[in-house]
Image: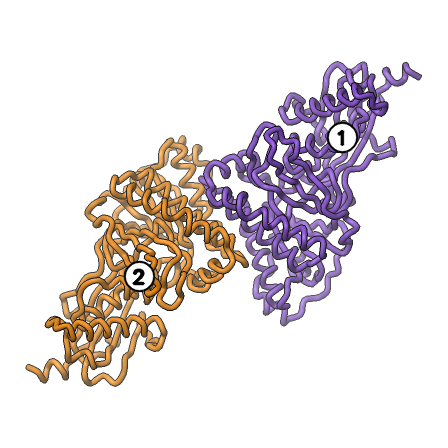
Chain colours: A orange, B purple
Amino acid sequence: MPEDRTEQPHIVTCTAPVNIAVIKYWGKRNEDIILPINSSLSVTLHQDQLKTTTTVATSRSFQEDRIWLNGKEEDITHPRLQSCLREIRRLARKRRNDGDSGVDSASLSHKVHICSVNNFPTAAGLASSAAGFACLVYSLARVFGVEGELSGIARQGSGSACRSMYGGFVQWIMGNKEDGKDSLAQQVEPETHWPELRILVLVASAERKPVGSTSGMQTSVKTSCLLKHRAESVVPGRMVEMTEAIRKKDFAAFAELTMKDSNQFHATCLDTYPPIFYLNHVSQQIISLVHRYNKHYGETRVSSFYSDIMGEISGHWTLFIYTYFFIKGLPVNCASLSEELKQGIGLEPMPKGINYIISTKAGPGPRVVEDPTQHLLLSDGFPKKTM
Amino acid sequence: MPEDRTEQPHIVTCTAPVNIAVIKYWGKRNEDIILPINSSLSVTLHQDQLKTTTTVATSRSFQEDRIWLNGKEEDITHPRLQSCLREIRRLARKRRNDGDSGVDSASLSHKVHICSVNNFPTAAGLASSAAGFACLVYSLARVFGVEGELSGIARQGSGSACRSMYGGFVQWIMGNKEDGKDSLAQQVEPETHWPELRILVLVASAERKPVGSTSGMQTSVKTSCLLKHRAESVVPGRMVEMTEAIRKKDFAAFAELTMKDSNQFHATCLDTYPPIFYLNHVSQQIISLVHRYNKHYGETRVSSFYSDIMGEISGHWTLFIYTYFFIKGLPVNCASLSEELKQGIGLEPMPKGINYIISTKAGPGPRVVEDPTQHLLLSDGFPKKTM
C-alpha cells in the first residue's frame, strides 16, 4: 500500500523519564553542542510517576516542521530543537547511504509534527527539559528508523537529557574531544540492580527558578573559582566513589556522597557573582531535618538532596508523618513518630512548607507506546482538541 | 606612697572596637594557639557606635583572678582567657627581667579583677569576642605596664580579635611558623585614609547563630574540599587585590571583592558536612536588592556582605528608605526613591525583615579611658551594683 505510507502520517508515540543527578552537572565548556566541564551521574526516575509523552508524525502532506508542548504550539526554530532534528535526519541519511534497510527513506524528506506533554509541572526543578529532549530524540529516531547510540543527540537538546536515554543508574562521561563525540551517557547499573531504593520528590514550591540553568551555568563558569576547582579536582574522584557505592548498594555511602555533592553544587552557585540562591528556607529546614534524623539514629537512614526543591529519601519512612504531606505515587509506610525522635530532631513541623511529595523509585529508559489510542496527534497529524 | 600602690587597686579602663572582615577568616590550622588556614583583612568599625569597655584592676588584696561579663560573673578558667592572662604576665615578667622600668613589678604577683561590657547584642554575628578579647588584652597590658606588639596575644583569645588591636584597615597575616610568632595583625591603612566610606550593619535577627564559629570552622576544615582550595589558592591573590583597592580607595573594586569573598565564605559553609546555613531569607533578599540596585545604575554604588546578618553599604543612601529601617548611629541621607528605581529593583519592601541598622564608619583601635568615673569596677575592685 504505497499510497497509505505517503499520504497517511507515520505516527510514533514514546515516553521518557526524568532523571535526578547524584553527582551534579553544572557548567558547559561548549555552549553550542553542550559539552560539560565535568562528568555527572544520575538516577532515572520511574515513569509510573513522572514522564514525558511525545508523539511524532511525518507525512508528505505536512508543509513545515511544527511542535506543540503541553497543549501550546511553540517555536520550532529554537536552536536546540533544530540541533536534534538536524542530527537525527543526518544520522538517518548516513544510515540509508550505508545501506541500512531499517531507515524509512520516504519519510526522510518529510516534515514532522511533534506533540509533547509532561505529567508534572514544568521548570520547577524537575528537569522537564531532560525528559522532554530525551523523548523527542527517542521518538524522532523511531519515526525515521534510526537505532543505536542516541545520547549524544539528546545531549545537544539539553545536557542532562542524555542521561534520560537510559534506565537505572546512568553516568554522563564528559569526554575530551572538541567535537563532543565522546561526551555520552552510559548505564552504570540497570534499575533492577537496586529495587528497594526509594526516592521522594518534595515539591516545596512549583515556581520557576529565579535564575534559569543555562544562564546560571554561564555566570558560574565565568565567575566561580570554586566551580573550576570542583570540576577539575573534586568530581573525578566522586564519580569513582559513587559508581562503587551503587555497585555495592551501600546506602550510607550513596546517600552521604549525594548530599555532599548537592551541597557543593549549591555552594558553587553561592560563589557565583552575583550569587544564585536555589535553596530556600523550606529546603534548608528539610536538609537540617534529615541530618538530625540520621544523627538521632546514629546512621545514615535518610538522604536528602535538592535541585531547587527536591528530596530523596530511602528506607525508613517514619520521618514523614512529621510534616503532614500529601503523598502521590508509590505507597509510603507512615509509622508514627516516637516522642523521643521528635525531641531528638527538635524542629517544628512545617504544615505549609511542602506542596506535595512524589514517591518513586529507579525506573527504565524511554519506551515506545504500542497502543495507538495513546497518540497525542490524530490521524491527520494534528493535536487532539482536548489538550 | 608605697602603701597606696599595694593596698588600693590599680585600675585601668579601655575600649576596643568591633571589626568586620572583607576577606574572611574561616578555619584554623592550630586550635590551641589559634593559627588560621588563610590570611584575612578587615575594617575596624568606629567605637562611637560599637565597642567593648573593659576595666581591669590589680590589688594585693585580691584572692583570685575573677571576671564579670555584661554584668554576670563568668568562669575565669576558660582556656582562652587563661591564655591571654598567662601570655601578658609572661611578657611583663620578661620585660621586667630585661630591665624595662615601665613594668609594674608589684602588680605582677597580684590577682586581677576584670569587668567588661558591650554596647551591642552578644553573639549575633557582631564579632563580640573580637572586641572583647582585644579590649581584655589591651587593658591587661596597660595595667601591667606592657607595651608593643599585642595582636599575637589577642589572637590566642579569639582569632579575629588580633585585627581589633588596630584602627582603620587591618590584615591578619597567617604566618607559617609552628609557634605562631609570625601570625600577627598589621594596619594596612589608618581610618583617616578613607573617611567618606560608610558602613551599615543591618541586624535582621539578634538570635545566636545556629552553629558557633569554633565548631563550625572545625567541621569545615575537616569536610570541605572547597575551603581547602579557597585557603590555599584563592585568598592569597585576594589579599593583594583587596589591599590595592583600599590603597587606591577604589570603591567598586573594594565592594565587589568584599561581596565575592563573603559569598565564597558562605559557599564553604554550605560545602561543609553537615552543611552550615548562615544566610537566612532576609539576608538573601538584601543581597539581591543590592545587586539589582547596582545593576539599575550600571555601577557598584552599594555593597553588601553578610556574616550572618550584616550589611555594609557606602555612598548613595536612597536604597534604604525602601525598607523602613530604624537607624542608629551616624545620620543617613534618606533621599526618596524614584518610581523608575523601584521598578528597576522589582522587589517587595520587607517592613519586618530588619530589626535595626547601625550606621558607622572606619574607626581607631583600642583606647585608654582617662576619666576614672568611667571605671566599671569600684575602688574596692568590685563591679558597680548598677550593672
Q: In the orientation shown, which residue stands out farthest toward the right?
A: B1
Judged left or right of residue A157, residue A222 is right
**Disc 2: host chain:** A
What residue is shown at x 75% (from left), y 25% (from top)? Answer: B114
Residue situated in front as seen by the camera: A329 or B309? B309
Considering the image in quadrants, where does the N terminus of chain B appear? Answer: top right
What residue is shown at x 57% (from left), y 53% (from top)? Answer: B260
Residue B349 in picture, x, y percent from top left = 60, 60
Mark 1 or 2, closer to the camera: 2
Residue A133 image label: none
**Disc 1: host chain:** B
Camera sees residue A118? no
What residue is shown at x 48% (from left), y 45% (from top)? Answer: B226
Badge 2 amino acid: Ala
Callout 2: few (<14), some (14-19), or many (20+) C-alpha neighbours within 10 Å?
Answer: many
Residue situated in front as seen by the camera: A108 or B125? A108
Considering the image in quadrants, where does the C terminus of chain B appear? Answer: top right
Q: Which residue is mark 1?
A: B387
Q: CA distance from mark 1 to mark 2?
A: 66 Å
Q: Secondary structure at mark 1?
A: loop
Q: Which residue is mark 2?
A: A161
